[in-house]
Image (cartoon, rainbow, N blue to C red):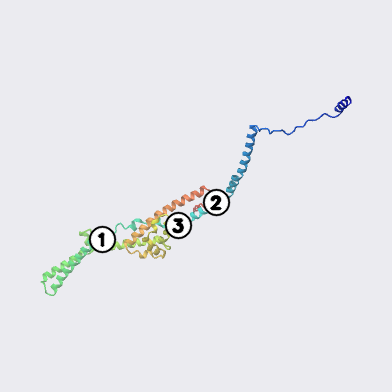
Amino acid sequence: MAENATTTMTAGVDSPPAQLRAGRPADPVETSQQERSEAVDAEQAESTEADGDGPSAETSAGAEDEPGLQDDEARQAQSELKDLRLMLRQCDRVLLMDFELLSMSEWPDNYSVAQARRSRDLWLLSAIVAASVFLSGLTGMVPAWVAGGGFGVCVFILLLGVPFIRRIYTNKPSYLDLILRRQRMLSDARKHVAHLEGADGLVWQCARMARYNATLRHGRFSDMIRLSEQRVLPRYLSKREHIRLYLIFMLEAERAYNKIQQAFFDGNQAAIDRGWQEAAAVPEARA
């Protein structure tokens, strides 16, 4: 026993000391509140990074498509401004319309013409009766002094029909004066229409502006548009009603022209503001 104890002590002195190693805990240790919150934050950060990949990709794709959309908008604006500029160039003669000439405000009305016709008929009847009395005296049917009186009355009545003598006793125009005035006003209006129509026709080109004034699509203008396209419109304006219809169309066309002009100015200014130099109109160089 003593020997064994001695041997054990000896061996304990010579051998290295025993080393203790950490072992596996018998029961799981509960995670602290701070560790759990850190883990949750880490998961949220990972999910946020994963979600962030989608919008960033969409933003980059949108940034790539934006120049293409701007190019399409610029081309569309350029096409619209080109159409507006063409309509303004083709229909600019609308601004040369003379309202007073086409409206014919001094046109003799039917009542004045009817009165002048009645006065003319009475004048002719009186002259015929006086001439009949004079001719009857030549055949011996009436006395000579009656025939001479009839001759004098006939000459006097005929002199009253002379224009410069007629103006001495009355200021009313004669039937012939009213008819000549109507023809002159109608001729002047037709010349003005021919000037407006020109060689290419104006009415049928202004019919393109119906998008800005729906009245230009009315059926009563269809024949006039067709004749204008055939370049024969002025010769068919033979009545005052035709001239008035042409005037109404020109007034509606002028309204549409003003709207197109304003739309062109607004579109051109918008193109300049957005930097679309190709779409914007370039001012002409001054001489």
Determine contact: label 3, label 1, CB under 8 Å.
Answer: no
The tag earlier along the polypeptide, 3 or 2, is 2
Position of residue 150 measured from the top left corner of the image (x, y, whole percent): 14, 68
Q: Label 1: which residue?
A: 110
Which residue is farthest left? 143
* Label 2 Cα neighbours within 10 Å, binned few <14 / some 14-19 / many ≥20: few
Asked which secondary structure carries label 2, the reply is helix
Q: Label 3: which residue?
A: 87
Give the side of residue 16 with respect to residue 231, left or right.
right
Return the residue nearer the eye: 132 or 58. Answer: 58
Give the side of residue 212 with respect to residue 148, left or right.
right
Number of numbered discs present? 3
* C-alpha distance separating marks 1 and 2: 65 Å
* C-alpha distance separating marks 3 and 2: 27 Å
* Label 1 Cα neighbours within 10 Å, binned few <14 / some 14-19 / many ≥20: few
Q: Residue at x 23, y 62 (%)?
A: 114
Dividing the picture into quadrants, the one containing residue 202 is bottom left
* C-alpha distance separating marks 3 and 1: 40 Å
Q: Label 2: which residue?
A: 69
The tag earlier along the polypeptide, 3 or 1, is 3
Q: Amino acid at mark 3?
A: Met
Position of residue 287 measured from the top left corner of the image (x, y, whole percent): 49, 54
Position of residue 166 measured from the top left corner of the image (x, y, whole percent): 21, 61
Q: Amino acid at mark 2?
A: Leu
Asked which secondary structure carries label 3, the reply is helix
Determine contact: label 1, label 2, CB under 8 Å.
Answer: no
Asked which secondary structure carries label 1, the reply is helix
Give the side of residue 81 with respect to residue 224, left or right.
right
Return the residue nearer the eye: 43 or 231. Answer: 43
